[in-house]
Image: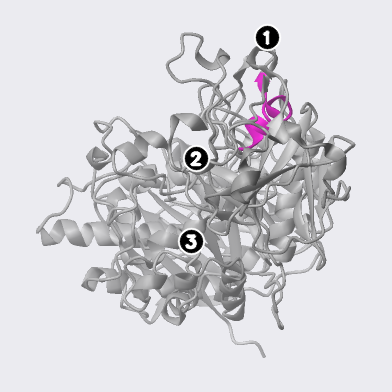
Amino acid sequence: MSTPHAKTPKENVQHAPNQKAHESDVKPEDVKPETVVSRIREGLPFPLGANWDGLGVNFALFSANATKVELCLFDAAGEVELERIELPEYTDEIFHGYLPDAHPGLIYGYRVYGPYDPQNGHRFNHNKLLIDPYAKQLVGKLKWSESLFGYTIGHPDGDLSFDERDSAPFVPKSKVIDPAYTWGRDQRVSVPWDRTIIYETHVRGFTMRHPAVPEELRGTFSGLMVNEVIEHIRKLGVSSVELLPIHAFVNDQHLLQKGMTNYWGYNSIAFFAPDPRYLAHDKIAEFKEMVAHMHHAGLEVILDVVYNHTAEGNELGPTLSMRGIDNASYYRLMPDDKRLYINDSGTGNTLDLSHPCVLQMVTDSLRYWATEMHVDGFRFDLATILGRYHNGFDERHSFLVACRQDPVLRQVKMIAEPWDCGPGGYQVGGFPPGWVEWNDKFRDTVRAFWKGDDGQLADFAGRMTASGEMFNQRGRRPYVSVNFITAHDGFTLHDLVSYNEKHNEDNDEDNQDGSNNNLSWNHGVEGPTDNAEINELRLRQMRNFFSTLLFAQGTPMVVAGDEFARTQHGNNNAYCQDSEIGWVNWELDDDGKSLLKFVRRLIKLRQAYPILRRGRFLVGNYNEEIGVKDVTWLSPNGSEMSVEQWEDGNGRCLGMLMDGRAQVSGIRRPGQDATLLLVVNAHHDGVNFTLPKVPEGISWTCLIDTNQPDNHSHGELPFGTEYTITGRSLLLFELQREEQP
């Protein structure tokens, strides 16, 4: 449906939706301005966005280079444009106006005027209806059409041409919301970092097949707050639910043409609005209610956020929001050719967080989700971009500084994915204090070790002690290393032990997408097998991976479904699979049930033994004052590892003795924790390991043996016992202390 206004009416002229027949012949330019009483008032340049104050709505939009902004009002369905009103005031680069009779529920968008001069970075086109970057809710879906583009597709001048078609019928509209919500006694859970275990999941994928979730609620925030869903997470023992992007995002045109979607959602277009697809009842309060349910269960909510780019793509992309509002301010453009975009994100464009108003938008968005929506933390996609100036990454980038000093943001969890596609993009260990970081070296080393690769022993020891060579500086704590074996991106844990190669044929890209460097091992057969021996070994390897993850120093991250061995059938790039491939299958087989039981036990052990989640790095130095070494690395004969043993490429067995008497804080006194011995054996054969003699102890008891997951105790084992460590297994022993008089 085309809008009633092919041409722009004279400013502030009102067009009632139900005009009489004789009035329809009156041309806007024939109406004398003095005969029209405008209902728009000056309003204020703050806060940005459309904000209802109980009496009316204030509209405020930043643009440094626009010449005029029109507010476009729509009918309740968001389909018919009823009226265009020029925002009357311009203060400090903010266009603003106030509608005294407007209420929550009002559907609106903007048309922004200015030069169409791509070679100088300007792409204004008032024919394109634009989403408010501060919109709290969107209505309608993006419908791909050539009219969404600021230039005429197929024109010989390409993106230098100018398209005059109206995009309003095809673009989502912004909606004014009523922010009121009764939170009751809800408050931030504030789980200490040392007790944090992150559970990464997807709103839609987690609930689409859950039997307890009613059909109409599946794939939504309402589905996520169903008691049985929350109970599963709570009983697992994790502390924090990390949701893949929930900000409103766009489905790529090429995916829709193939019958797929941008399932993961790393294609944001509105940083304040939840994606409409995740709202079962079309009300923002639904998200808040979900958060309240999580908090009631003692669970934190962390959002995976994408502030590095938008869905508008490169110079050939659509004009949906920021490109048409002020392209030269919002995006990083090539210094020598402002027609082109710097593409550090690999998605076509990069937001310019060095611009104060773009920085303000991002920090305003973070504060909104933290304060208004009660979110407990954020994981930043491609976070290096957020700290990069034109000359490279800088830990004193205005964004990183703003977050560190902000009284709200410094109290929530801030997690960086410390890499991107730009120059000097790999910054693991390079983020400033106050941030924790995804540690991909943990993933790669642990995978290689349990796969049986040569020369992994020394690196493995480093990963078990929170990668101190990268993070042990400036007072940062072990928890800053977010350890993971799997993530949304890559194989599931089940597939990691079941496939040598990726199998992404269903993505319709000839299996060319996704990483080839998986460090995976199928244990002899590619994919499913009836071979009982292989299946048992795969299951043990999954137990090894989970045990390594949960007994290592640092913050563990678990991917939803791994705890019961979910599969994506070898697909290691399910970004476009809103299907059985991407959804969690809740029909657990016996192996899945046994693994789930095992993982629950591991998590209970981690939370019960503080030495597994210390606040100080284990460094292996002897503390003369208290006569204790915090960690000792042991060879199979029970003696300390020699240099030769560390350098032996064939070494695959190691003991990690964590002394509970080690100093736990800056106060110089012995600790009171349990002493634990972790033994790993990545050999295919068993290894006899001599249990060491330890001061103040009398014997050892076995807490975990991944080869015997159901055997909780082997009785007391005297010092000097040669314990046969099964091939490809992990054991955890606790020291039994002498009776204190």
The amino acid beneath tag 2 is Ser
**Which residue sits at x=69%, y=64%?**
104
Q: Secondary structure at mark 3?
A: helix
Identify residue for label 2: 2
Alpha carbon separation for disc pair 1 and 3: 42 Å
Neighbour tally class for label 3: few under 14, some 14-19, many 20 plus, Cα within 10 Å: many
Measured as percent of width and height from the top left, residue 325 is found at 69, 33
Looking at the picture, tell me which residue is in the foreground, 34 or 395: 34
**Compared to 204, does 526 lie above or below?**
above
Alpha carbon separation for disc pair 2 and 3: 28 Å
Question: In the figure, residue 505 lies in which quadrant?
Answer: top left
Looking at the picture, tell me which residue is in the foreground, 157 or 677: 157
Identify residue for label 1: 336
- Is residue 322 a member of the stretch shown in magenta? yes
Which stretch is magenta?
321-333
Is 153 on the left or on the right of 424, as rendered? left
Q: Is there any visible trace of residue 309 in the rendered image?
A: yes
Q: Which mark is residue 278?
A: 3
The amino acid beneath tag 1 is Asp
